[in-house]
Image: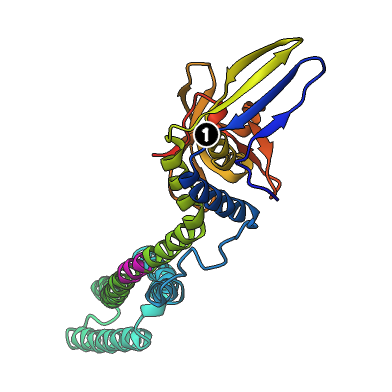
Amino acid sequence: MGSIFKPSVTTVQSPSQSNTAYDIPEYFKEIQEATLRKGQTEFSKPYEAYTGQRVAQLDPYEIQAGNIYQNQILPQSGQLAGIGQEIANAGAQTYDAATAQAYANPYENQVVSGALGDLREAYGQSRKAMSASAIGAGAFGGERQGIENVLGAERYIDSVGDTSARLRQAGFESGANRFMADRGSQMSGLGAKLGAAQGQIGALQQASQGMNAYGNQARGIAQAGLAEGYRDFIEEREFGGNQVKQMIGALSGAPIRSYGEERTGYTTTPVAGPSMFGQIAGAYTAAKSDIRLKDDINLVGKSPSGINIYTFKYKGDDKKYQGVMAHQVPEASFVGDDGYLKVNYTKLDVEFKEI
């Protein structure tokens, strides 16, 4: 294969012909050819995907914080609801007939019976005394004695009713007092139980939050390290291509022009051509511009010729770039060896650049 920088001839439909030759100083040839070989090598490389880890896993402290929340805080929060229901149930209790029966003195009937027995005995003694008095006065069985017996019976009946009611009322009030004391003790115990549970949950929450914050910070540091590793990979992967671009940029400004002649019939006319190395630069600086490779795409303006200009990121790359979408500029796009569209920006009035 000869040098690509030697004059080349392109023949078109007869009788018209055109010849193009490159006027290149010898001292540029070695550099140019080396640059092109390097570019061809970079172009032939297959796409190299990043296989390293890109997202940091949860820190052990974050996992421990989650376990505390799931296995301790949540179950104890359920216990709080149960204690609250117990307090509500205790507060709703009333001293009704059923409760009074439960709190009644089991010896109340015996006390009442004893008191009434004492009244009967006293009443009997009173009647004997009245009879003896009437006999002594010679009035036994008389009208007066009958009246006194009736009055005595009435007093006895009243005493029986008053005594029974008083004793049973005292028993009821005594039961009510015991009920209120028991309910107060129950409410106090439940309040203490609720306070202890709330305090324990508060301590667990504080510990869990502290662990989670520490773990989150540690994971952030780990994530920064992974991101740095990915950036290093990208820089290493693009290093050769960037070198070629820099060399092309330096050589493209060299005052090397192609020249030629166009023959039509019997007339020969010199024709100026484009910069030879500019053509090579255009071939190499074709950028991957397939929309399938891009994320975060935003339209930011138009070029003087009306081409849409976008900002975007390549998938897996945090850097932001400015350029075009290949499918919108078919006149400057072509399919690369990897199957994705590329764009030759030298054919457009849009600059591809990192921003």
Residue 8 pos. (x, y %): 67, 34
Classify residue 239 as left or right of residue 329: left
The location of residue 173, given as percent across then percent down, is 27, 73
Q: Position of residue 262 (x, y in %)?
A: 67, 17
Residue 217 located within the stretch drawn in magenta: yes
Identify the residue at image location x=31%, y=87%.
Answer: 111
Q: Is residue 169 visible?
A: no
Q: Residue furthest front?
A: 266
Magenta stretch mostly in which secondary structure? Answer: helix
Q: Secondary structure at mark 1?
A: helix
Is residue 88 a member of the stretch shown in magenta?
no
x, y (%) of residue 141?
Answer: 30, 79
Q: Quadrant of residue 279?
A: top right
Amino acid at the residue labelled 1: Gly
| Highlighted magenta segment, given as a residue range | 213-221
Q: Quadrant of the C terminus?
A: top left
Q: Nearer the viewer, residue 85 or 5?
A: 5
- Which residue is farthest right? 14
